[in-house]
Image (tube, rainbow, N blue to C red):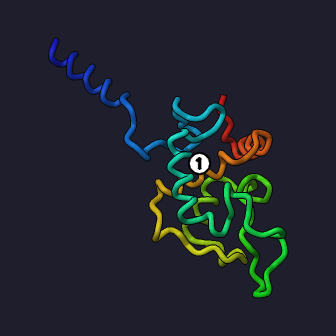
Amino acid sequence: MKCLTCLLAAILLISCGPQEEGSHTTDPGQLSLETVRHRWYTQKQVDLGQAIFNEHCLVCHGDSGKGAVQDWQTPLSNGKYPPPPLNGNAHTWHHDLPVLRRVITEGGLRLGGTMPAMGGALTETEIDNILAYITSLWPDDVYQRWASRFGYEKN
């Protein structure tokens, strides 16, 4: 009986231990205690996401997601829309995490944009880290409207 108690205690301790890198959930219903205050992500995800963003997204979406063109709402000469800013000044915050993941994975061509599909170049964890970085750029009021809209509030 004593061995069984020790074994159960060991299993409990292991299952409550720290998660592996990149394994943090982005399911708002299962937020980690490590998340940034009132946000769905961890600071580690933001830091990793910024590096990935800078490598794959910055050239089109601009430094800190500020956008690379003045007017992202006017189609280009080819009829496609330019990349929008991602820092809370455009429509990105109007979409929930699954839609944002899908846009990154599948690209924006079918939506009238020019964004290539990144699903083959990035893992799901890398995409979640990019989303952590992008949503970290949003001012608190924009983030709170987004969180309320999609049920991502955190106390």
Asked where in the image residue 40 lies, by quadrant, the reply is top right
Secondary structure of residue under mark 1 = helix
Residue 72 horizontal/vertical position (percent):
80, 69
Question: What residue do we see at 20% from left, 22% from top?
Answer: 7
Taking the view exactly as shown, the residue that stands out farthest to the top is 2
Check disc 1 and report the residue beneath it. 132
Residue 19 horizontal/vertical position (percent):
39, 37
Question: What residue do we see at 37% from left, 41% from top?
Answer: 20
Question: What residue do we see at 55% from left, 39% from top?
Answer: 43
Q: Give the crowd class for mark 1: few <14, some 14-19, many >=20 residues within 10 Å.
A: many
**Screen quadrant of the C terminus:** top right
Residue 1 in sight here? no
Q: Is residue 126 left or right of residue 70?
A: left
Vertical placement of residue 64 versus 141, above or below: below
**Screen quadrant of the N terminus:** top left
Vertical placement of residue 3 versus 130, above or below: above
Asked where in the image residue 66 lies, by quadrant, the reply is bottom right
Q: Amino acid at mark 1?
A: Ala
Asked where in the image residue 2 lies, by quadrant, the reply is top left
Q: Nearer the viewer, residue 143 or 7?
A: 143
